[in-house]
Structures are given as C-alpha cells and as structure tokens.
C-alpha cells in the first residue's frame, strides 16, 4: 500500500530538486559514462538498489531524496521503500530501497547518498544535544559554520533531530517555524552600548520576537545583565551569555551567579541563555553543576558533524539476486521499510 | 595597489553568488533584524570587519567570498584585503578584512564565514593527504558523502588543497580540469562480468579517458586483475582495488601481490589504483610497507572534514578602534594581506 | 586410601618416561652434584617436596609426572598426593606433594616442574578458547608451532583443556581420539585446483574422515565455496576459511556471506570452519557479530602459550618442618589433594 | 657450491632425528592423507617450499631441520638453501628453501616449522638479554620451566642466542660446553645450613667446578654472604642472590650493599651472581643503577619465550611458479641463503 | 543559642594563639596596609566573612581558629558560626562565618585560612588511611617529615581524622592521649643487637609502655622475630616490620610468614606491626592479600598531605549583601553551621 | 677548616631554636625512651649520623638545623659537615653529617629531619617556578595556605629557592627583604569601589611601596584596568589580575588584551601582574603564548609542596663502621660537604 500521493507531493514540494542536480552536475563522472555505455549496449534492466548508513543515528534527507526519485523514476515502473526523516536508523540497516529501470536512476547515486549522509549526520548530532539537555530547549546556531548553499538543509536536519529552533531564514522555512535569534555583537558594537542596542531592538522589532540581550560585549556579564534587566524590565525574556574563550568561556558558576544577581535585583523572570562551544559534554557539565540555563545555542557541534556515510548496492537485476563480493545477493529483509512511491 | 579588476572579475565569474544568498535566505535572522534597526536609526557607519580561522590550514572559499562582496559593497566606498585561496593560514590569523558601510555587508556575515569554514576544512584535509602521499597523485572521490549542493565546492577545495583530480562534474568545471573516475560496481553488476564491462567501457568511451578497471566486484582481485589485463592489453592504464571492509580492505600485501602477478604476466605498465577508507594514516601505511600504489582515491577523509570555523569581529567604527571583550580594538596587523577590492 | 594401583598403572602406561630423563639428561646439573654430595655425606632423609604454580589455570602434566615418580620412588617408602589432570588449580595452590627419601627423587625436580609448567600452560590456553566458544567445537591445530618432540604433549594438553580434537597423530593417540584435519594448501597447489583436490580427497580417503575443503587457496572464498559444494554435494561437511592476513584475515562478514551464498545455492548442510590467528578475542568477535561458524581451528594461541611456571619447595626433612625464607615451614594444607602413590 | 658434506654431516650428527618424527607421529594428520592421495594419483612433482618467520630475531633450529632433510630427501634430486643457526633473520625473510620431489618431504612440514619456531623464539629471547647485559655473562637457568623433552634444545638455542652457559646436562652437550650451576635450595635445606652445604660442595665436587654459594635460604643475604666468604675464603667464586618475591626480589641496592660488605670484609674477589625473574628490563634496571652484578641467571624469559611462528609455502611445481592467494608465485630472492644440501 | 562559654574556653585553652600571630607576623603584609588605610579613613563596618575549602574532607583547625577569634573579636559585637573539628566538609561548603567590625579580624585572614588548610589536609589524609584499615589501628608516625613547629598540630589533626595514636609528645598532649612508639634503629645500632636492645628497653621503660621490637635492623626479619620473641616471651606485644625499600619493603607474604613462624614457635600473642611507606593503597594491599597485620604506622601519607586550601570572602558590609565577581552576594545558607561565639 | 664561628653565629641567630624543640616536645617519644635507656646503661658512644633526602631539589632548613646543633652538641667533641641552604642536592646524597656523643643529639633526629624536609620541599617548588619564569619575577603569596607557625619559614624557603619577594611579614624578616603585596579583595569590598580603594592606598601608604591595583573585583578586568590607570596615572606600577576560576581564571589572551588596551590608552608603563593557581605549567602557558606578564604571584604550588622526606642513619659507632640492613656501613663519601661546626 503506497502512501497517498497527494500528501507526499505536498510534503516533498519544498525540496524540489534543482536542475543542476537533475543534469548530473553533482554526480561522479563515471555514472555519466555508465549510462552512456548502457544506452549503447541497450541494457536497461530493472534493478534494485539498497542504501544503508555506516553508523547509527537519526535519519534525515529522505524527503529530499524522494523529491528527486519522484521526478526521475518512471511512474509506471517503480517501487520505492523507505524509512522516514526523523526515524532512528541502525548501522547497516537498509533505509531506502529503489526498484526501477537502472538508466532512470543510476546517475543519481551520488546525490542520493549525499542527501542522506549530510542530513543524517546533522540530525544525529542534534539528537545527542537534545538527549543531554532533557527539557531545556536547544536552538541551532551553526549556519555560519557551513557553506550557505546547505545552511538551510543543516538547520532543517537539526530541527528533525529535535532542536526547537534555528537561526537561518531558510532552515526555518523548511521546518515551517519562525527563525530564532538574539542579536549579534556587531549591533552592539555599531551602537556602542549594550543597553542602547537592546532598547533599539525593543523599539523597532516586532513585539512577537522575544527580547534576548547579549551581555558579554563590553562589560562583565553580571554587571551588564543587571543593566539591561533594569532598562527593559519585564519585557526582557532572557540574557544571553556567549563569553569568548579568551575570557574563559561561560562557566556553570557564571550562570548561577547571574541568576542569583538577577533574582536579588528583582528579575526572576529573565532567563539565562548560553552559547559558545556547546556540545553534549558541555550541556551535561552545566546540568551536573546545577546551572539554571534556560536555553542552549548550538553551533558547530551540529553544523560540523561528520556526515554519516551511506553505501548503495545493487541486489537484484531483472529479478535475479546478485551482489558484489562482501554483500549478500537478493533483497535484505527490513520490516521497518514502508512503500512510499 | 588593488589587483587588476578585469582579472579578478574573470576569476570570480564562476563563483557567481546565487540570488537566495543575496536575499539573505542563508543568513542568521538576527542580521536581518540588525539591518532593520540600523536603518531605522539611520546608522550606517563605515565599519571594519576582520575574519580569522580557529585553526590552521589551507584557506579556500575566498574567491566565493569576494564574488559576493564585489556585488554588494559600494564600489566607491570599500576596501577589501585578503589572503588567496590555497595559501596556508595560521590559527587566529586575519584572512579577510572588509571596510565599507556596515549596512552593505552586515547581512552576509553568516554566508562569508560559511564559505571560508567549509572551503578551508576541505582544502586542509586534502593537503594532509598530499603530504602523506608525496609524488603519488590523489583524486577526490568523496562527492557521494556530501550534500549535492556543495559537492562541486568540496571537489574544488580538494583541488585547491592539492588533489590532481576529482570525480564530480561540477568540481572539475570549477577547477578547470577534466573529471576523473573509473567505473562503478553498478556497471559491472548490471553487465554481469568485470571483463565484459571493461571491454564495453573501452568500446564506447572517448579514447582520451583512461581505462581503469575496478577488479574487486566478483572475484579475487589478483585473479580479476590478470583477466582484465589480458583482455585489454596495453590499453589498460590501471586496475582499481576497492576491497570492501567485509573482505578485509585493501592491504599493502595485496597491492604488492597484484603488482607482482601483473609483472609476471607481462603487464608492467598497468598501474594499481587504491580506494576505500583512505586517510593520511592509510597512505602512510601503504608507503611505509613499500606497496607500489600509483594513485589514491580519497573519499570521506576530505568530504567529511570538519569545517574550520571562522570568527568575524568589528574592529573599527567610523575610524575609531573598538572591539568586544576578548578582542583587541583596532586593525590587526597582517602584512600577508593584499588589497583585492 | 591410595588409588587402585592397576588402574593407575594402565593410565600412566602411555606416558612412559624416556631413559634420557631417567638418566637426568634434562636435569639442571646442580641436582646431579647435590645427589653426589648427599651420597658422599650418606644423607638420605625422607623429604617432603611440594609444588605449586605461579598462576591459576587448568592443570596438566600430572600423569606424566606420576609415571616418572612411580618408576623412581621406592615402593615401600613413598607417599604422593596430587590433583588430577584437567582440574582447575589456583595460583600458589599445592598441586603435588611427594614424600620419599630425597636421593630417590631430587634429580627429577627439573623434569617434574617442566612437565607441569608446559602442560598447565597449554591446557589453560585451550580452556580460555573453549570458554569463549561456548558450544562451538575447537580443534588444536598448533603442532607446527612447537618443537616436534612435544607436539603430541601439547595436543594432549589442549584436549585436557577442552578441545574436541587435534591435528597431530601423537596427540590424538595420547588423547585416545581420531586426529582431525582438513587438507593443506600444499595438496591444492600440487594438484592445481581446489575442486580437483577435494574430489581426489573424497575418492581416496576413508569415508569415516569428514570432507572439509580449504577454499582460500586460489580464488575468492565465496566463489570457491560454491564450486566445491556444487562438486561434492551432500558429502561436503564443511568449507574451511583460512584467509591469510595479506588478504585481511577471515572476517565475520565473510562467514555470514559464505553462509548466505551456500544457503542460496542449496547447501544448507555445509558448515563453515574458521582458522588463522584464532584467539579468545577473535572467537568472541565472531560470536558477537553473529557469524555462523561451525568450528574453530586454534593454532599458536594454545601452542605458543607461555608455560605457567611451578615452584618446588622442601617443607619437611625427616618429619621436621623446615622451609627457606619466604615459605612457611611444614606441610601446606590442601584438602583437594588425593593420595595417588 | 654446496658446503662440504663431511663437515655438515659431523655438525648434524648430534641432532639425529628420532624415529617417531620420521614416522610422522608429530605431523598434522592431513599431511599423511595428502601423501596418500598423491601416491594414489601418482603425483610426485619436484616442488619448492620456502619457509619464513612471522617476526624478526635470531634463527635457531636449522641444523635440526637439515638433519631431518639430509635423511629423507633423495640425494640425487634435492637442493636445500638456508641461513645458519645464530644468524639474524628479518620478519618474512625466507630462511629455508627446499627443492625436491614433494612426496619426500611433504610429511615433515609440521616438524620443520616446529624446529624453527621453537628455536628462533628461544634464541631471540636470549639475544635480548645479552643486548641488555653487555659484557656481563648470562646463564640459561630455565630448564625447569619447559617440558624435559625439549629442555636441552632450549638451552642449546639460548647458547646460540649468546648465553655463555646453561644448566641442563643435555643443553651443554649440544652446545659442547660444561653445564653451569650453583646449588639448589634443596641441598641447603637437607643439610640444614648454608655454610655447611657450601663446605660439603667444596669438599666433594671436582675442583674445576666454580664454587658459587646460594645465600638467601635461611638468613639475610648480606649476613650469609659474609659467613660463606669467611668460611671458604678465596675459593669462593661468587655468591648467588635469588631472593624470592615474597622477600621483595633482588634489588640493585642489595647487590651494592653485599658488594660493599664483602669488600669491607676483605673479599673483593667474590662475585655477585643474580637470578630470579630476570628479564632485559630487570637487567637494564641493575645496570642503570650501577649494581655491580657479575652474572645473571635467566629463567623463564628465555624458556617461556613465545615461539616465533614460521610459514611454509610452495612457490614452484615442476619448475612453474605458483602460489596461494596472498603470496607471490616463484622463488623469492634472498641473496643471504647458502646452498647446504 | 551560643555554646556554653566556659566549656568552649576550656576546650580552646590548649590552642592559645602565640603573640607573634596576634601581632600579625604571619600575616600577608597587605592586610597590615588595609587596616592602616581603613583606620585613616575611619572605616570599620561590621563585615561578614565566610570561609570554605576547595576540596572535601575532614575539617580540622577550627578550634585553633576560634581561640584566635575569641581573643581578638569584640565580645559585644561578634557572631561566629562554624562546623566542628572532625566534621566532614564538602568542597565549597561554608565552614566558618565571622561577623564583627572588620578592623578587629581583617589582619587574621591569612592565619585563619592557614589553620584550616593545614589541619583539614592532615585530618583528611588520616581518614583515608582509617577507611582502608577498617578495624586495624593506625598510628601517626610522620613527625619527622614536617617542620617541628607544626608536628604537634599535624599529629593532633591525624588523631582528629581517626588515628588511635601518634608519636610526637606535643601531638599526644593536644589529643590528650599517651604518645605511641616502638624503638628507633638508632637504639639497636648503638647497642649492637636487637635482642639486647629489646631487653634493655624492657628493663628500664615503664611497664605501662607496650614492648614492640623493631626486627629488621641486622638480620632477616623472620629470624629476628623469633629471637626477640624467645627472649621476651609473653611480655612482647608485637614485632615491628619496617623493611627498607633497598630490601624490597614489607610484603604481605613476609607478614604471613612471620605470623606463621611466630605461631609455630609458640608465640601466637605477639602482634605484627607494619610501617614504611604506608598509604591507603598499601593498607588495602595487605588486607586484600590476607596479611594478619595488627597495626600500621603512617608517615608521610599524612604528614605530607597537601593542605586543602580555603578561601575567605566578604559577603555583607554593614548589613548589605555584596561580593566580588564570581561569588554570590549575601550570606550563604548552611544549616550545618552552629553558633560558637 | 671550620667556617669562622662569629660569621656563622650571626647567620644562625635569626633561627634560634624555641625551647619547646629543645625540650623535645616535637620529638618522637621513642627517642626520649632511647636516651633514657642509654643513660641508664651508661652508653654514650661518639656516633656519626648521616642524613639524605629521598628526592632531588634545592636544600633549605640547614641553617635552622645548625642553630639547633650549635646549641646542643658539646663544643669540644663535635664535627658537623653539611651543604648550604640554596645548594642543589641529589636524591640519596648525604647533606648533613653529625659526629658527636649520641646522647647529645639523639633526641633531635625528628626535628632535624623535619627542618630539612619542609624547607627542601618549599625551596624546590619555588625553583621550579623560577625555571619556568626565566626573567619574570615571582613572589611567594602562599602564606594563607600553610599553618601560621611556619608561614615565615615557607616564605624564607621560597626566597632561598629564588623568589624575589614574599607576602608574609616574618618571611620577609628572615630573608632580610621588604614584604611584597598588592591589596586584598577585602579592602575593595569594604570601600565599595576599586578606584576609590586604590586612591586611598595611594594617599596613605608609604610612597616606597609600589602601587599595584587589583582589578577583578567588581568589573571586567580590562575596563577596571583602564579606570585605575586613568585615576592614578604614572604612579600606578601595575594592575593585578586574579580572575577567579568561576570566571575562567586569568588567560593569556586576557593579559594580552589588558596590555593592548593600557597601551592604547597611554599607559605603557603599567605592568600586568598575574596570580591565582599559578604553577610552572601555567607560567609556561603564559610565556608560550606570548602574554606580557610582568610578575607572578605563586600560592599553593610552593606552600603546598610535599616535603621532600629525609632519612637519618647511624654509620659509625665509636669509630667503627656499622649500619642497618639496606645501608652501607661507614662514612659515605661526599666531597661537596663542608665542615661547618
């Protein structure tokens, strides 16, 4: 039973494959040559290709892949089985099975593996942060650490992995949420003072956007926190600590002290948001020491996550089991796969 | 003295920035808000932004960055100083200095850092392989392990780092070389036999493309090597060993044995190309054991290299030194920078 | 109550001590001198010697020792207490107590300790393999890694430690079993083809000997396995994988693939026997990864096991407790000892 | 040019192969079956077998091997090339090449590899001790830690590796030296006092045997050393320290103190011989701390050395290069080999 | 409710602060300057100082501190809260809170922290030994390893940490116990023989002092133990093993052997006391191996324990919460504190 | 030739031994008993005691020891040989040899070893800091981490080890220098503002005392540094960074930034003094990163240094060589010793 095609088309619309991918610009050149040879040999058997990751994690990139397959596979001679974005996937578990005339999809092996490797790498890293953070929300802040062509994809995968927000405009659009963010050091430096910058932010920016002030630019964080809290009062949702490594990074004790001083000054409602080199280990450190963090901004732990490489193998040609050395011929059983195309 | 503008425009043409980046889709949302606030405050000071990496390596991504800056900075009020793609760069060394009205470039901090982080990460990993390999050429084979939107960029950076070839069509176009590649297991599986596939390749593919046969699909590598060498004779440039981990990967001893058996069978001119999990350590292993490899295919060591994160800071506003805590106000001296725009 | 002497004589018969040992050829020269001195001093007190291992394990070598003591101790003035071959023994636990006139046994301290040290070392290593292998039978294949004078003793100790078979003729005779083995690479190389060699084996060798074909000599193991299985049909008991380290050793995935391909080809009854560098860790690796191995051939892990050294001390002279520094005078209590002579 | 046959026959005489080895008792059973098959198939090609170690060291066991080959190979159709006992051998270096009709030697592969593995293991361990000890002589004392059937072979190999003496009677006979040794604790315990035992030794034992007294049996070593030195005077060649681990083993400081006290008491000519758990590391420890040791007794470091396994491969059948997978067909060049038979 | 002042005065009497401390000789000079400035500025606010350790352990030094504070704080304007000597204290837990006019105590911050750091370091190390030793008594023997000005303080802290005795006269006085000790090697060397020295000890020293003989001076410990036990009979309470490292230190086996030989010789009532490099690990070693030790002498493990540094901070000035960066203003809650002054 | 007695008496005067030490309060009780026994036995031989450290370093405590020996040894029957405070001393090297009637000094073994152990431990740690710091001066700031009875001794030893200053009044008196120090956080907290406190310091404290302001109490260090530099102008000698661990400790980057900002603000003459957890590794860290530190304050690295234990042995009694087991009888040659008494 295939998923309802209208539903799936709606879901895949936002991942429309660019023409350059359709043309094979991103493909390994030997696939172009393979198709050329097979065409001249008039060989176009129905082939079954299975793809599996070389590590476990949270899968992402399947919808991007399906958007491509939907477009290139012949509608009357195709069968695609897959897991869903956001599912856990075990190492070596078949996550995608494509059955169609080989010439229709052979060129896209490179792109398909790339979608899955990148997406799964990012989503898995995000999940690791979430598991460390428990109830504390995590926001993906790593757009600046990846190539802008994929920053939206990265943020989307972070969302699939469990992040409750992301900073890039495109990532938010793919995830169908509002982008998150506070303010850059640049705004404060241009305006010359944190309080002044925060008041300007409050004056011009849509009230639906949370007021979060970045308090480590010019002064000691505790001192600046009190200044902005006094200036904005109840409108201040949180202060953000992003102390640079040159100043010893954010410590659990700093969070506790800022919290205590805010409370003593009558600002119990102002949260403390922490960013800068956040990893699952760092999250655990803050939690183990009882630091009352109200949110984490995650940068390169997610954006710089190593892709989880996928392998694709042909397991059947015109109905006959086959495989290269090291693989077992024939379809690999996986009851978790659902027919999607 | 600025570089000749015609020259640079020619060089940057291939890195034309997509409209979505110009529109700020890949930007962190807080930069959109910053620009909005500054516009309403009518603040548009000339600002100096400096960017440096948090690790050393081979820089790449500068040309992509300059293509963007060339387009957005006002031509009569800009000054851009930079290193060049392919230069070594030290940790914390300023690699790019931009001086212009802040509103003209503030939105692009995210994209600029992303260009540089990704490119430098890939180019640096490639260089590490090259340093291990010495005279033996290395080809970038990792397109399948990254998102197809950046596989060309990755292959280009690998080329900048020293690879002599790459497999993706787009990467080769950016590097202005012919794409490299042998044949996929899929071709052999579809055709059912390695010798048959190799003969078909030889029959149809342009003679300018080197004949390299992949010999681990169905039979023992040594046996298959002799079969294809006997079939193609002098036209065979090399065999490619890509033994899967399930069969113990390629070993130095396998390379030596294949070499010896090819020589004994009268095929001294056939090279032995090795791929599969190649890293600088693995390259060193082959060389230390005297394995006569004639080329390496590098996959995820380059494509999965962690980006080398960059940081951008404002150091001057309207001619006055300034900086956030942890940075030193004013321009950072770096005589290696050249004026490019 | 001493064990029935007829029984024990039967049991010890196969370990008849060679004359060279009786003459003291293998003894440390200082024992010859000690006996010479004591004879001239006319000192021949009844002495109690206790021997214990400097490590724990499975004891072996006691029957060899008793065969010697039975021959040299005066029948009317001797008392020997011991554990039994195959018993566990703790570090420092007294495993043998000999009470007799000192001149009758003093010369044999070297030989007795040597019997026990070698035997216990081999039997203990065998037991470690068995504990890792659970129900999967292990065969001792290490005769080639020890001096031929003791290869039978080694195989016997492996049997005492739990191996279900061994390859040497003499080891099998001592253990009262049929020797085990498949075929050497030499047979296949001399005959030029694995299938041909296997068919010849089947033609000439007594049908009671299991047909096990060695499948890594010339071709890929999976390919060769199918060839011999097709050639011998149901007579083939197993294939043996012995992939050399130059080809990446036998991997768990190879075992699984050969199993799957044999099953797919209609040979579910053909087992997969694995050899080559097998250790308890390697056995565990195969089992943990679910490789369906039907037997292991163990070589140097058993044959190269370090002897577990024994120490012998005099604890009583003419009924008076005595000991050297570092030992406690008098008999050491050990209720597990049984009177054997 | 073959070595003079009279010479070699004299040299090999002492290694006469026992009948049980000739009969193949120590052989793997599959070699018996192989010979049976080949006889029935009337296949007896001239084969070249090469043997190499899987580790580097000092080779021993070649003379034992040649004694066997001399007896079984047809004198008119044989060619044996080898290194010599005592030579260094590199890992994987061919140490023995045998060319003869296969049926004449196939059965002895097990024994040949066993001779070489054991001998090379022991000789290599001895050499390691010697390299640490420099000019200080080392005596092999490990007969008690190996099976008495091979204790002579072990002591011979220790001599080949560089030991200047050994304790077993048979080892000394093979090495053509006098056996070395002091006295056992047993003699002292039976006689009840170290001085009394030492005087008895001096009274009865041939004057050509060095007087070395074991001084740790009943009293503090320094105290006992002075007692025996005072009792024997200049006839005492050395005291032997063999402090048990229960008393903290021999320390460098103990050696220095005993030396100083002997000197202060007028016994500068009495040496200090050390035994008990001696390894190259322990030898280095004594030397680094300036302990004036005059000789070391080495036990299980040599006797318990793991055999250095050898591999034998057929490389030529009736003049045609051949080899199993993982090996290179044809003779392996090694200019160090000399023709011996 | 303050503790009864008579009680506390009695308790503190033995810790009377020397005049040099009252005069500030041991103070950091900047506190002298601080008091000078504040006097000239006529600033003498009531200040609250809190002190906490930078590590967990057993607190000691509080009574010394209170003796100082009792003397310098104005009786009508002071409030002191503290834990008690011997309490456990957690890292960062406030252990002492002093509220009084700042000029009355500011000069003594150095001394107070020093009392607590030293005392807590020693008491904590003692407790670690006690926890390892269980029921076996431990005696502090480390006076020789610290400056004589503080050896009494060290021994007192060891007693507070759980030692049942100590060797220094002053330490015993502070702890209100009899000093413990056996005899030095010097006595034995001066008298020339261990038995002679032990008999002299027994002849002249008050019978209330236990007779414990040091048995490693001239002879083997087991031999000497039997000699002194035979000489003193039932009057001998224990032998003390203090084997120097040059003789391999005391081993568990030595203790067991001495015990066995004493028992065999009819001296079951003579204990075995062990000293020399004793640490919690060494105590555990003896216990794990079943060595029947009846007492441990602990030296530099306690006396050389690193002080557990304390930090003192002002948290309130004239009733207003205040603190330096990194600390939280206002009193730190700790319900375990009791009002003592 | 003995050192001139007037000179030495002057030098030792400041180390006058307290009566409690003379009375043996700090002695192990067994020395009291030893003296009692020897008196009753009328044994008072001239004995030679040698003391050596169990580790290498910089010796300190000898002058304190000599002050004691000068007082207790009979002037007409004594001979004392020693190294000098500040000398290097090797492990096990005899540093002090005392020859006199045993009853005159036996009681003081405990105190003598304590003087030397403590002093050598502290001086050695100081030297390690100095070796790391090169030309940058180090000040001993650890008085607060040791018992006040020895804080002066500790500071004196730090001076002997190479520190150019110390904070305790008594330490400075022993070293014959002015005490060093800046100001405590307490002064700033009591006065409420760093600039205010610094101005008050400048107003009241003798001009000969350097003005060094502590800048981490309330505000960011860089901000506060500029405030105090602007307030005091050229009178400010240095700022002191003592950032607590809760704020990430002092980093090399902070030092560089404070330096740059002071320079940019026209205060190139103001130094940057660093304290807080300073160790040789931390000093190396600052220097390796090019941080322009002008002085280090060292606390617990010196004050908490483990004593380097000394051992004292009798080597001669009435002119006859003697020693306990493990030592060599008679005087130990050491040409570095000089006769001092």
Image (cartoon, coloured by chain):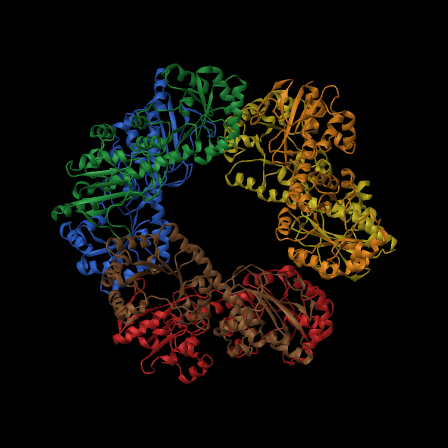
Chain colours: A red, B brown, C blue, D green, E yellow, F orange
- Between E274 and E203, the one nearer to me in the picture: E274
Residue F211 % position (x, y)? 79, 52
Quarter of the picture containing the N terminus of chain F is top right
| On screen, residue D332 above or below A167 | above
- Between C122 and F53, the one nearer to me in the picture: F53
Asked where in the image residue A226 lies, by quadrant, the reply is bottom right
| On screen, residue A191 above or below D135 | below
Q: Is residue E4 visible?
A: no
Quarter of the picture containing the C terminus of chain F is top right
Asked where in the image residue A316 lies, by quadrant, the reply is bottom left
Residue D225 left/right relative to C2: right
| On screen, residue C57 above or below B330 | above
Q: Residue at x 26, y 70 (%)?
A: B203
Q: Residue at x 71, y 35 (%)?
A: E148
- Between D202 and F237, the one nearer to me in the picture: F237
Residue E68 left/right relative to C31: right
How many marks the image carries: the answer is 0
């Amino acid at each position: 039973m295939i998923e309802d095609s209208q539903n799936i088309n709606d879901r895949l619309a936002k991942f429309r494959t660019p023409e350059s991918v359709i043309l094979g610009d991103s493909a390994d050149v030997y696939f172009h040559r393979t198709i050329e040879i097979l065409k001249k040999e008039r060989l176009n058997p129905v082939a079954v290709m299975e793809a599996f990751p070389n590590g476990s994690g949270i899968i992402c990139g399947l919808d991007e892949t399906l958007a491509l397959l939907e477009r290139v596979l012949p509608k009357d001679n195709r069968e695609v089985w897959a897991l869903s974005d956001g599912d856990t996937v075990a190492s070596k578990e078949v996550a995608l099975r494509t059955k169609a005339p080989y010439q229709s999809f052979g060129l896209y092996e490179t792109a398909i593996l790339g979608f899955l490797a990148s997406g799964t790498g990012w989503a898995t890293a995000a999940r690791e942060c979430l598991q460390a953070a428990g109830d504390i929300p995590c926001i993906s802040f790593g757009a600046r650490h990846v190539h802008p062509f994929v920053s939206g994809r990265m943020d989307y995968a972070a969302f699939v992995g469990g992040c409750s927000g992301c900073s890039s405009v495109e990532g938010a659009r793919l995830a169908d949420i509002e982008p998150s963010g506070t303010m850059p050091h640049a705004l404060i430096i241009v305006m010359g003072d944190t309080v002044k910058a925060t008041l300007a932010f409050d004056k011009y920016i849509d009230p639906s956007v949370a007021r979060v002030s970045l308090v480590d630019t010019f002064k000691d964080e505790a001192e600046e926190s009190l200044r902005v809290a006094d200036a904005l009062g109840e409108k201040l949702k949180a202060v953000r600590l992003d102390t640079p490594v040159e100043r010893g990074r954010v410590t659990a004790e700093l969070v506790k002290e800022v919290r205590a001083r805010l409370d003593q000054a009558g600002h119990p409602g102002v949260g403390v948001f922490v960013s800068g080199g956040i990893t699952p280990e760092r999250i655990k450190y803050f939690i183990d020491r009882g630091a009352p963090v109200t949110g984490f901004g995650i940068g390169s732990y997610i954006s710089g996550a190593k892709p989880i490489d996928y392998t694709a193998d042909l397991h059947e040609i015109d109905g006959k089991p086959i495989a290269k050395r090291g693989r077992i011929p024939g379809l690999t059983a996986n009851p978790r796969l659902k027919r999607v195309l």
